[in-house]
Amino acid sequence: MARPGAVLLLLLVTSAAAVRYRWLDPVSLQGPAVQILSAESEIDCGLLCEEASPEECSGFIYGPDDGTCRLFSGDCRGPAIVSSQQTTERYMARSKCPGNTSDPCACPAGFIRCAGRCLKRLDLAVTYTEAESQCAALGAHLAVPRSDEENRCAMIAAGGTTVWLGLTDVITEGQFVGADGCGTALSTDPYWGDHQPNNMNGNQYYIVMGVVSNGQWNAKWNDQWGSELFSPLCQLPLCYRPDCQ
């Protein structure tokens, strides 16, 4: 007898309009599997992932030859892919998007879809640490643009407001690590403003997009002190749809 929910999950996994799991190829997986279990089928492997929280299982790889079910926590998709970590195996990525057959590209309420990502600017001015907490409360992290298109989308979502991005060089000066868990962004990226990052007074470890100069909003990146007050720009980690622009 099939386990509860198996028929529904089968539809979700195999349907062209799948919204719970999506086969992502290519994808970079950050580190080894969190859990290695046994399962009789890909459906059962998906159910094991479903029993864990989204943070504990962001997706899975099932080996039909030996019944190995590998559950992963964290994956990098789209422009964030690191070729040296790229897998060619059938990785089924979990999604928290509310998409359905009538609107498969839907983001949760309040988020906008752009370049496959779901973004939301919060209308409040807070420190960097508080901005992280505000996004985390939505199941998101501070946005990390990793392509020209994603940077343009961040500009659109910012809407002329200075926003916190999810990049810091707290650990190593000049190596800005992304809150998405997908590595660093180069300090030579064209998104930086003139003479930025400059690490003024030796402790500007956090990045904002957009500064106002002479009454004009400039969408370039700048490093800032974490105690400054800016709006959080949040990005959902498990809601990437490369086919949705």
Image (spheres, helix red, strand yellow):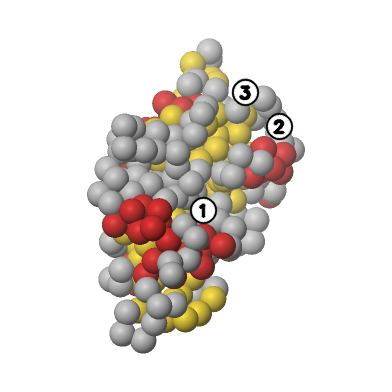
The spot of residue 214 in percent (x, y) is 53, 15
Q: Which mark is residue 126?
A: 2
* Residue located farthest toward the bottom when viewing the structure as drawn: 66
Q: Which residue is mark 3?
A: 123
Q: Quote the CA–CA distance across marks 2 and 3.
A: 10 Å
- Tell me the element at label 3: loop
> Residue at the location (42% across, 61% down)?
6
Give the spatial CA distance, label 3 vs label 1: 22 Å
Residue for badge 1: 180
Between 113 and 18, the residue placed more toward the observer is: 18
Q: Quadrant of the N terminus?
A: bottom left
Look at discs 2 and 3 and give the one toward the viewer. Answer: 3
Give the vertical position of 27 relative to 119 (above or below). Answer: below
Q: Is residue 60 above or below residue 244?
A: below
Crowd rating for badge 2 (residues with CA inside 10 Å; few <14, some 14–19, many 20+) = many
Question: Mark 1 against mark 2, which lies toward the viewer?
Answer: 1
Residue type at numbered disc 2: Val
